[in-house]
Image: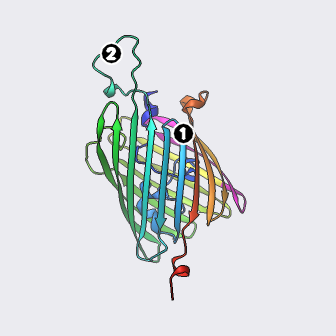
Amino acid sequence: MLLLSVALAADRVEGSETLATGHNAIANPLSNSAISANPAALAVTQRYHFGFAASYGERGLHWNISAADSKTTDYIGFGLTYSGDRYNPPLQTWELPGWSVPGQVITNRKRNQDIGAALAVPLIDRHLSFGLGGSVSFYDHERQGKGVAGNLTGGLAVKPTETLVLAASARNFLPTEDPDRQRPLEILGGLYLGDIRVGALTLEGGARPLRDEVLVLGAGGEVALTEASHLRGGWRLEDGGHDITFGAGAGNEAASLDLGLAIPTVSVADPGGWTVQLSIRFEGPDVDAIRPE
């Protein structure tokens, strides 16, 4: 049970399309999830998208708003996120009080509000991109008190063909103090192979060097049932715990409505440990079309 409260990093901001494919986001060029997972993936395609998501389950109530723009200019890709959550996870060993009254219920309420930003620079006609981003978190926890935390993430993305993206990222690489211990150093590599008209395959692998359970692995995919509907599934190993993920989406490159479900294998028979997320994504306005002559 203690693994459940640290299964997802606190500053991970994602849409249901990546949650449903094993939380695989570092190489996905079509998702705003790249803002926090790998900023470099923002600039290997031209797009201008807004996203909204809300979820409930393993991590209590969570929400996020995001904007990604690599269309306004050919020279940079830029992303912004705002996210927050309210949850009451099981106590970690290091959070236990020095003493307690017999029969007393010990709570562990946590509240976070995060602001994130990312910048990517595309090169070689968007076949190569470098990115840097980070987040600042304002937390109010029953056990750790109030404060401010944050960290930086960097990455690169390579697009050999229009359907293949290879990527690598280093998340939370600054040696800063994190009272909540939910922003671990994470080094990942992965790929995205797909066409929105057909489907996609995503793979990720890497390590959290400072964790007891070092290995991180993820695999997922989606199939286009029609031009406007997708079915998704995936798996993730993180902090020694396994997630099985499912989802579906309706829409196209301009807009979509997506549903995602993550089920820890230790909670298969307990729906209270599942996470359900609904998100929407839509294109921003065409600046060239509305700009005065």
Q: Which mark is residue 56?
A: 1
Crowding around mark 1 (Cα neighbors within 10 Å: few <14, some 14 to 19, many 20+) is many
Position of 91 with respect to 292 (left or right) is left
Q: Disc 2 and disc 1: Cα gap in Å?
A: 30 Å
Measuring 53% from the left and 64% from the top, which residue is drawn there? 49
Instruction: Indicate yes or no whether the magenta region holds residue 27.
Output: no
Relative vertical location of residue 197 with respect to residue 61 in this rendering, above or below: below
Position of 214 with respect to 223 (left or right) is left
The magenta-colored residue range is 223-242
Furthest residue toward top? 102
Measuring 66% from the left and 60% from the top, which residue is drawn there? 251
| Residue 3, image x, y percentages | 44, 31
Q: Amino acid at mark 2?
A: Ser
Can residue 258 be seen in the rendering of this structure?
A: yes
The one nearer the camera, 160 or 43, is 43
Lower position in the chain sequence, tag 2 or tag 1: 1
Residue at the disc numbered 2 = 100
Q: Amino acid at mark 1?
A: Tyr
Quadrant for residue 145, please give it: top left
| Residue 74, image x, y percentages | 45, 77
Task: Give the secondary structure at mark 1.
Answer: strand
Crowding around mark 2 (Cα neighbors within 10 Å: few <14, some 14 to 19, many 20+) is few
